[in-house]
Amino acid sequence: MARDDAVIGCAGELIIGTRGVAGPGEVLVRIRGGSEAFLAWSDEPLPRGSTVLVVESRGARQVDVIAWADPLEVPAD
């Protein structure tokens, strides 16, 4: 399956944590007017519920992600 360039740069939330080089997790990404799930790979393990940014598409509904905090989001007190 071809890579999906539309998903690159989108934020999402991990619904299954990643395990770094030990294996992928799963991310729910807001894209194309809805939400879609992708297998998510990261260099370092990231826990479930983490906000991530998609930095690359591997094709076949697989993406590379990094931990990310929205700079425009105001933290709750």
Image: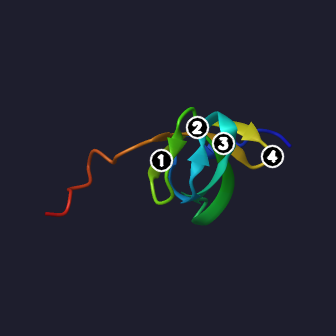
Chain-order first, disc 4 or disc 2: 2
Q: Secondary structure at mark 2?
A: loop
Give the spatial CA distance, label 1 vs label 3: 11 Å
Element carrying mark 4:
loop
Residue 42 in the image: state x and y as whole percent.
Answer: 58, 37
- Mark 3 crowd level (few <14, some 14–19, many ≥20, 10 Å Cα): many
Circles 4 and 3 in contact, beta carbons < 8 Å: no
Considering only vertical position in the picture, is 29 above or below 21?
A: below
Look at label 1 and name its amino acid. Answer: Val
Residue contact at pointers 4 and 2, CB within 8 angstroms = no
Nearer to me, 63 or 26: 26
Compared across the picture, whether 74 is left or right of 55 comes to: left
- Residue for badge 1: 52
Inspect this view and state whether residue 9 appears. Answer: no
The answer to whether marks 1 and 2 mark residues whose Cβ atoms lie closer than 8 Å is yes
| Mark carried by residue 72 | none
Disc number for residue 42 = 2
Quadrant of the image occupied by residue 50: bottom left
**Label 1–label 3 contact, CB within 8 A:** no
Is tag 1's residue or tag 2's residue first in the polypeptide sequence? 2
Which residue is at a point 65% across and 62% down the rendered structure image?
36
Residue 63's label in the rendered image is 3
Q: Marks 1 and 2, Cα distance to the nearest angstrom?
A: 10 Å
First along the sequence among labels 1 and 3: 1
Q: Position of residue 41 (x, y in %)?
A: 64, 41
Looking at the rendered structure, the kind of residue marked 4 is Ala
Check disc 4 and report the residue beneath it.
Answer: 60
